[in-house]
Amino acid sequence: MNHLLDIASLSVTEIESLLEKAFAFKEERNKPLLSYHGHRLATLFYENSTRTRVSFQIAAERLQLPVTDINLTHSSEKKGEIIEDTIRTLAMMGIDLFVLRHHQDKLPHALAEVLPGNIHIINAGDGMHAHPSQALLDLMTIREYKKDLSAAKITIIGNIRHSRVANSLQVLFAKMKVQELVMVAPPIWQPEQIHCGRVTSSLDEGLQDADVVICLRVQKERFLANESFDLPSYRHEYTLTPERFQKAKINAVIMHPGPVNRNVEIEDTLVDSNHSLILRQVENGVFMRMAILDEIVGGIV
Ligand code: CP
Protein backbone atom coordinates (compact mmCIF):
# COMPACT_ATOMS: atom_id res chain seq x y z
CA MET A 1 0.00 0.00 0.00
CA ASN A 2 1.57 3.28 -1.14
CA HIS A 3 -1.09 5.72 0.12
CA LEU A 4 -4.42 5.49 1.92
CA LEU A 5 -6.72 7.67 -0.18
CA ASP A 6 -10.12 6.02 0.08
CA ILE A 7 -11.82 2.67 0.66
CA ALA A 8 -12.56 2.19 -3.05
CA SER A 9 -8.82 1.82 -3.73
CA LEU A 10 -8.48 -1.10 -1.28
CA SER A 11 -9.05 -4.75 -2.17
CA VAL A 12 -10.93 -7.06 0.20
CA THR A 13 -7.59 -8.84 0.80
CA GLU A 14 -5.96 -5.54 1.83
CA ILE A 15 -8.90 -4.74 4.13
CA GLU A 16 -8.69 -8.18 5.77
CA SER A 17 -4.93 -7.76 6.16
CA LEU A 18 -5.41 -4.37 7.88
CA LEU A 19 -7.99 -5.92 10.23
CA GLU A 20 -5.68 -8.83 11.05
CA LYS A 21 -2.79 -6.43 11.77
CA ALA A 22 -4.95 -4.10 13.86
CA PHE A 23 -6.21 -7.00 16.01
CA ALA A 24 -2.64 -8.29 16.37
CA PHE A 25 -1.49 -4.86 17.59
CA LYS A 26 -4.42 -4.77 20.01
CA GLU A 27 -3.57 -8.20 21.40
CA GLU A 28 0.14 -7.29 21.36
CA ARG A 29 0.89 -10.16 19.00
CA ASN A 30 2.70 -7.68 16.68
CA LYS A 31 5.73 -5.90 18.05
CA PRO A 32 6.96 -2.69 16.39
CA LEU A 33 9.39 -3.44 13.56
CA LEU A 34 12.86 -1.94 13.23
CA SER A 35 12.02 -1.02 9.64
CA TYR A 36 10.31 2.21 10.81
CA HIS A 37 13.81 3.62 11.24
CA GLY A 38 14.42 6.33 8.65
CA HIS A 39 10.75 7.26 8.33
CA ARG A 40 8.96 10.28 9.79
CA LEU A 41 5.30 11.25 9.84
CA ALA A 42 3.67 14.69 9.73
CA THR A 43 0.09 15.52 10.65
CA LEU A 44 -1.36 18.34 8.53
CA PHE A 45 -4.87 19.19 9.67
CA TYR A 46 -6.62 22.06 7.85
CA GLU A 47 -9.86 21.22 9.73
CA ASN A 48 -10.44 20.64 13.42
CA SER A 49 -9.81 17.20 14.88
CA THR A 50 -9.28 15.52 18.21
CA ARG A 51 -9.64 11.79 17.52
CA THR A 52 -8.00 11.33 14.12
CA ARG A 53 -5.03 13.64 14.65
CA VAL A 54 -4.10 12.38 18.11
CA SER A 55 -4.85 8.78 17.20
CA PHE A 56 -2.41 8.88 14.25
CA GLN A 57 0.18 10.58 16.46
CA ILE A 58 -0.14 7.93 19.18
CA ALA A 59 -0.18 5.11 16.61
CA ALA A 60 3.08 6.45 15.14
CA GLU A 61 4.69 6.85 18.57
CA ARG A 62 3.77 3.25 19.46
CA LEU A 63 5.57 2.17 16.30
CA GLN A 64 8.58 4.31 17.27
CA LEU A 65 7.94 6.40 14.17
CA PRO A 66 8.83 10.07 14.83
CA VAL A 67 5.96 12.55 14.44
CA THR A 68 5.89 16.25 13.56
CA ASP A 69 2.58 18.05 14.05
CA ILE A 70 2.52 20.93 11.56
CA ASN A 71 0.98 24.01 13.14
CA LEU A 72 -0.86 25.46 10.17
CA THR A 73 -1.76 28.74 11.86
CA HIS A 74 1.97 29.54 11.85
CA SER A 75 2.96 27.83 8.59
CA SER A 76 4.23 29.53 5.43
CA GLU A 77 0.94 28.77 3.67
CA LYS A 78 -0.24 31.95 5.41
CA LYS A 79 2.32 33.71 3.16
CA GLY A 80 0.91 32.19 -0.02
CA GLU A 81 2.72 28.86 -0.31
CA ILE A 82 0.60 26.13 -1.95
CA ILE A 83 0.11 22.82 -0.13
CA GLU A 84 2.07 20.88 -2.74
CA ASP A 85 5.13 23.07 -2.11
CA THR A 86 4.67 22.77 1.67
CA ILE A 87 4.73 18.97 1.39
CA ARG A 88 7.73 18.97 -0.97
CA THR A 89 9.58 21.27 1.47
CA LEU A 90 8.81 19.05 4.47
CA ALA A 91 9.83 15.97 2.47
CA MET A 92 13.29 17.50 1.92
CA MET A 93 13.66 17.59 5.73
CA GLY A 94 13.05 13.84 5.91
CA ILE A 95 9.27 13.51 6.30
CA ASP A 96 7.83 10.80 4.05
CA LEU A 97 4.38 10.10 5.56
CA PHE A 98 1.74 12.83 5.52
CA VAL A 99 -1.57 12.47 7.37
CA LEU A 100 -3.78 15.09 5.74
CA ARG A 101 -7.22 16.46 6.62
CA HIS A 102 -8.57 19.10 4.24
CA HIS A 103 -11.92 20.60 3.29
CA GLN A 104 -11.33 20.02 -0.46
CA ASP A 105 -12.81 16.78 -1.85
CA LYS A 106 -10.15 14.48 -3.38
CA LEU A 107 -7.18 16.78 -2.60
CA PRO A 108 -5.23 13.74 -1.26
CA HIS A 109 -5.78 12.01 -4.62
CA ALA A 110 -4.58 15.04 -6.57
CA LEU A 111 -1.45 15.34 -4.39
CA ALA A 112 -0.68 11.62 -4.64
CA GLU A 113 -0.78 12.02 -8.46
CA VAL A 114 1.76 14.86 -8.64
CA LEU A 115 4.11 14.26 -5.71
CA PRO A 116 7.17 11.98 -6.02
CA GLY A 117 6.66 8.27 -5.26
CA ASN A 118 8.63 8.42 -1.99
CA ILE A 119 5.93 10.66 -0.43
CA HIS A 120 2.97 8.81 1.08
CA ILE A 121 -0.40 10.45 1.65
CA ILE A 122 -2.88 9.21 4.26
CA ASN A 123 -6.32 10.74 3.91
CA ALA A 124 -7.62 11.77 7.35
CA GLY A 125 -10.83 13.21 5.84
CA ASP A 126 -11.29 15.19 2.59
CA GLY A 127 -14.34 17.43 2.38
CA MET A 128 -17.50 15.39 2.01
CA HIS A 129 -15.71 12.63 0.09
CA ALA A 130 -13.91 10.06 2.25
CA HIS A 131 -12.62 9.22 5.73
CA PRO A 132 -11.09 5.79 5.16
CA SER A 133 -9.31 5.27 8.51
CA GLN A 134 -12.56 6.02 10.35
CA ALA A 135 -14.48 3.47 8.26
CA LEU A 136 -11.77 0.85 8.85
CA LEU A 137 -11.74 1.35 12.62
CA ASP A 138 -15.55 1.18 12.56
CA LEU A 139 -15.34 -2.13 10.72
CA MET A 140 -12.84 -3.42 13.30
CA THR A 141 -15.23 -2.43 16.10
CA ILE A 142 -18.23 -4.08 14.41
CA ARG A 143 -16.18 -7.27 13.82
CA GLU A 144 -15.42 -7.52 17.55
CA TYR A 145 -19.13 -7.57 18.22
CA LYS A 146 -20.45 -9.37 15.14
CA LYS A 147 -18.04 -11.55 13.17
CA ASP A 148 -20.43 -12.48 10.37
CA LEU A 149 -21.28 -9.32 8.43
CA SER A 150 -23.35 -11.33 5.96
CA ALA A 151 -25.88 -11.73 8.78
CA ALA A 152 -25.81 -8.11 10.01
CA LYS A 153 -28.31 -5.32 9.55
CA ILE A 154 -26.56 -1.98 9.87
CA THR A 155 -28.44 1.31 10.15
CA ILE A 156 -26.79 4.70 9.64
CA ILE A 157 -28.78 7.70 10.91
CA GLY A 158 -28.36 11.41 10.28
CA ASN A 159 -26.65 13.71 7.84
CA ILE A 160 -25.74 11.14 5.20
CA ARG A 161 -25.53 13.73 2.40
CA HIS A 162 -22.61 15.69 3.88
CA SER A 163 -20.85 12.76 5.51
CA ARG A 164 -17.48 11.49 4.32
CA VAL A 165 -17.79 8.78 6.99
CA ALA A 166 -21.09 7.54 5.51
CA ASN A 167 -19.54 7.56 2.03
CA SER A 168 -16.57 5.46 3.14
CA LEU A 169 -18.78 3.11 5.18
CA GLN A 170 -21.09 2.48 2.21
CA VAL A 171 -18.15 1.50 -0.01
CA LEU A 172 -16.68 -0.65 2.76
CA PHE A 173 -19.96 -2.42 3.58
CA ALA A 174 -20.50 -3.17 -0.12
CA LYS A 175 -17.02 -4.73 -0.35
CA MET A 176 -17.51 -6.73 2.87
CA LYS A 177 -20.97 -7.93 1.75
CA VAL A 178 -22.98 -6.71 4.71
CA GLN A 179 -26.43 -8.34 4.68
CA GLU A 180 -28.43 -5.11 4.87
CA LEU A 181 -27.55 -1.42 5.06
CA VAL A 182 -30.27 1.15 5.69
CA MET A 183 -29.55 4.88 5.77
CA VAL A 184 -32.07 7.01 7.64
CA ALA A 185 -32.17 10.74 6.95
CA PRO A 186 -34.62 13.58 6.47
CA PRO A 187 -35.09 14.31 2.74
CA ILE A 188 -32.63 17.27 2.74
CA TRP A 189 -29.85 15.01 4.07
CA GLN A 190 -30.41 12.05 1.80
CA PRO A 191 -27.43 11.32 -0.47
CA GLU A 192 -27.40 12.15 -4.19
CA GLN A 193 -25.43 8.99 -4.90
CA ILE A 194 -25.69 5.63 -3.13
CA HIS A 195 -22.84 3.10 -3.14
CA CYS A 196 -24.60 0.46 -1.07
CA GLY A 197 -27.92 -0.12 0.72
CA ARG A 198 -31.12 1.91 0.65
CA VAL A 199 -32.37 5.19 2.07
CA THR A 200 -35.48 5.92 4.11
CA SER A 201 -36.77 8.91 6.03
CA SER A 202 -38.47 6.62 8.58
CA LEU A 203 -36.37 6.07 11.70
CA ASP A 204 -38.69 3.33 12.97
CA GLU A 205 -38.34 1.39 9.74
CA GLY A 206 -34.57 1.81 9.67
CA LEU A 207 -34.14 0.71 13.26
CA GLN A 208 -36.36 -2.38 13.03
CA ASP A 209 -34.20 -5.43 13.96
CA ALA A 210 -30.91 -3.58 13.43
CA ASP A 211 -27.74 -5.15 14.83
CA VAL A 212 -25.59 -2.02 14.57
CA VAL A 213 -26.84 1.57 14.71
CA ILE A 214 -24.37 4.25 13.59
CA CYS A 215 -25.38 7.86 14.30
CA LEU A 216 -23.65 10.69 12.46
CA ARG A 217 -22.82 14.19 13.56
CA VAL A 218 -25.13 16.88 12.12
CA GLN A 219 -22.11 18.68 10.55
CA LYS A 220 -23.52 22.21 10.43
CA GLU A 221 -20.21 23.46 8.98
CA ARG A 222 -20.93 21.60 5.73
CA PHE A 223 -24.38 23.06 5.08
CA LEU A 224 -24.61 25.06 1.88
CA ALA A 225 -25.88 28.66 1.98
CA ASN A 226 -29.40 27.59 0.98
CA GLU A 227 -29.60 24.77 3.57
CA SER A 228 -31.06 25.24 7.00
CA PHE A 229 -31.24 23.05 10.06
CA ASP A 230 -34.26 23.00 12.29
CA LEU A 231 -32.92 21.50 15.52
CA PRO A 232 -36.26 20.99 17.32
CA SER A 233 -37.80 19.11 14.39
CA TYR A 234 -34.63 17.04 13.86
CA ARG A 235 -34.66 16.05 17.54
CA HIS A 236 -38.34 15.30 17.39
CA GLU A 237 -37.92 12.86 14.48
CA TYR A 238 -34.34 11.56 14.48
CA THR A 239 -32.56 11.75 17.85
CA LEU A 240 -31.87 8.18 18.96
CA THR A 241 -33.76 7.76 22.22
CA PRO A 242 -34.08 4.64 24.44
CA GLU A 243 -37.72 4.25 23.28
CA ARG A 244 -36.78 4.36 19.58
CA PHE A 245 -33.77 2.11 20.11
CA GLN A 246 -36.09 -0.65 21.35
CA LYS A 247 -36.98 -1.34 17.70
CA ALA A 248 -33.42 -2.62 17.16
CA LYS A 249 -32.36 -6.11 18.26
CA ILE A 250 -32.11 -6.61 22.01
CA ASN A 251 -28.30 -6.80 21.96
CA ALA A 252 -27.81 -4.11 19.28
CA VAL A 253 -24.90 -1.71 19.57
CA ILE A 254 -24.64 2.05 19.04
CA MET A 255 -21.71 3.72 17.31
CA HIS A 256 -20.78 7.29 16.38
CA PRO A 257 -17.58 8.53 14.72
CA GLY A 258 -17.55 11.52 17.07
CA PRO A 259 -17.53 14.21 18.14
CA VAL A 260 -21.04 13.56 19.53
CA ASN A 261 -23.57 16.35 19.99
CA ARG A 262 -25.32 14.83 23.00
CA ASN A 263 -29.12 14.92 22.84
CA VAL A 264 -29.03 15.90 19.16
CA GLU A 265 -27.80 12.72 17.49
CA ILE A 266 -28.12 10.40 20.51
CA GLU A 267 -29.80 10.89 23.87
CA ASP A 268 -27.39 11.19 26.79
CA THR A 269 -28.42 7.97 28.51
CA LEU A 270 -27.70 5.92 25.37
CA VAL A 271 -24.28 7.54 24.79
CA ASP A 272 -23.25 6.26 28.22
CA SER A 273 -25.18 2.97 28.13
CA ASN A 274 -23.59 -0.45 27.76
CA HIS A 275 -24.98 -0.62 24.21
CA SER A 276 -22.56 2.18 23.24
CA LEU A 277 -19.28 1.31 21.48
CA ILE A 278 -18.32 4.96 20.96
CA LEU A 279 -15.25 4.86 23.21
CA ARG A 280 -14.32 1.41 21.89
CA GLN A 281 -14.18 2.99 18.41
CA VAL A 282 -11.70 5.55 19.74
CA GLU A 283 -9.60 2.81 21.37
CA ASN A 284 -9.58 0.70 18.20
CA GLY A 285 -8.65 3.76 16.12
CA VAL A 286 -5.10 3.68 17.47
CA PHE A 287 -4.64 -0.01 16.53
CA MET A 288 -6.16 0.41 13.07
CA ARG A 289 -3.93 3.43 12.41
CA MET A 290 -0.88 1.45 13.57
CA ALA A 291 -1.92 -1.19 11.00
CA ILE A 292 -2.30 1.45 8.25
CA LEU A 293 1.15 2.95 8.96
CA ASP A 294 2.73 -0.51 9.20
CA GLU A 295 1.17 -1.53 5.88
CA ILE A 296 2.48 1.59 4.12
CA VAL A 297 5.98 1.54 5.65
CA GLY A 298 6.22 -2.23 5.09
CA GLY A 299 5.43 -1.66 1.42
CA ILE A 300 8.18 0.95 0.93
CA VAL A 301 11.10 -0.52 -1.00
N1 CP B 1 -14.27 11.02 13.82
C1 CP B 1 -13.41 12.04 13.63
O1 CP B 1 -12.89 12.24 12.53
O2 CP B 1 -13.18 12.79 14.74
P1 CP B 1 -12.20 14.06 14.78
O3 CP B 1 -12.85 15.12 13.94
O4 CP B 1 -12.12 14.41 16.25
O5 CP B 1 -10.90 13.64 14.21
Image: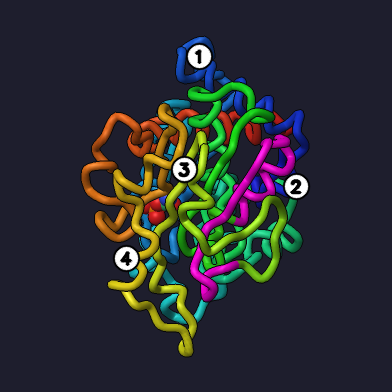
Which is nearer the N-term, disc 3 or disc 4? 3
Q: Which residue is the extreme one toward the bottom?
A: 226
The image quadrant where one finds the N terminus is top right
From mark 3 to mark 1, how far is it between C-alphas?
Answer: 34 Å
Q: Which residues are magenta?
A: 167-190
Q: Which mark is residue 236?
A: 4
Mark 2 residue crowding within 10 angstroms, few (<14) / some (14–19) / many (20+): few
The image quadrant where one finds the C terminus is top right
Comparing marks 1 and 2, which lies closer to the viewer? 2
Amino acid residing under circle 1 = Lys
Q: Where does the image place residue 8, in percent across and percent down from the top left? A: 73, 49
Reading the image, the residue beneath label 1 is 31
Secondary element under disc 2, as helix, strand or loop, is loop
Reading the image, the residue beneath label 3 is 213
Q: Nearer the viewer, residue 288 or 251?
A: 251
Name which residue lies at 73% across and 36% down: 177
Amino acid residing under circle 3 = Val
Question: Can you tell me whether the CB of the residue at mark 4 lies under 8 Å from the nearest atom of ligand 1?
Answer: no
Q: Are marks 3 and 4 in contact (CB under 8 Å)?
A: no
Amino acid residing under circle 4 = His
Reading the image, the residue beneath label 2 is 9
From mark 1 to mark 2, how far is it between C-alphas?
Answer: 27 Å
Mark 4 residue crowding within 10 angstroms, few (<14) / some (14–19) / many (20+): few
